[in-house]
Image (tube, rainbow, N blue to C red):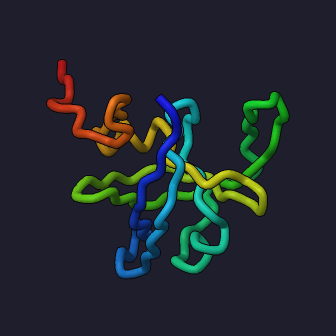
């Protein structure tokens, strides 16, 4: 399928006037969480709600990061999700949980996000 990027608007979940645009987020369905730059999250006032959360990187290394809450908007779609506070050297990416919240899936032939359709309900 290859890799591709999308732009997103990130908002403070309490005060949505505090926001920042991230023009290039790697779409990574293999990553559970979305990782966003520490400087941007600090600038828009996203608090660290969970500290010292352990994550296993693709190379097997275990790292600890903080996690906060943010509204993530991609085009007309939006969701609120936990976001990992990315430190210097970390990839900035849009993870599977956020994609599910946005109700978007990857179109492998077009290398872009598309609407997932109706949400299953019991």
Number of numbered callouts drawn: 0
Residue at image point 38% right, 38% down: 111
Left or right for 111, reference 42: left
Image location (x, y in percent) of residue 59: 80, 30
Whether 70 is drawn above or below 32: the answer is below
Quadrant of the rendered image containing residue 112: top left
Quadrant of the rendered image containing residue 99: top left
Quadrant of the rendered image containing residue 100: top left
Image location (x, y in percent) of residue 34: 54, 48
Residue at image point 33% right, 56% down: 74
User: Which of 105/82 is in front?
Assistant: 105
- Quarter that holds the C terminus: top left
Image location (x, y in percent) of residue 105: 33, 34
Residue, far top: 122
User: Which of 73/114 is in front?
Assistant: 114
Left or right for 19, reference 57: left
Image location (x, y in percent) of residue 60: 81, 28
Residue at image point 73% right, 53% down: 90
Residue, far left: 118
Left or right for 24, reference 107: right
User: Which of 20/13 is in front?
Assistant: 20
Residue at image point 59% right, 67% down: 47
């Amino acid at each position: 399928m290859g890799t591709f990027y999308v732009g997103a608007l990130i908002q403070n979940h309490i005060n949505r006037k505090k926001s920042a645009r991230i023009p290039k987020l790697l779409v990574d369905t293999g990553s559970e969480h979305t990782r966003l730059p520490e400087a941007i999250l600090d600038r828009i006032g996203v608090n660290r709600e969970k500290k010292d959360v352990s994550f296993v990187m693709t190379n097997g290394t275990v790292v600890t990061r903080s996690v906060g809450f943010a509204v993530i908007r991609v085009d007309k779609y939006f969701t609120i999700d936990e976001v990992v506070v990315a430190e210097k050297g970390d990839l900035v990416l849009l993870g599977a949980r956020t994609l599910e919240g946005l109700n978007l899936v990857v179109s492998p032939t077009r290398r872009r996000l598309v609407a997932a359709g109706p949400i299953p309900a019991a």
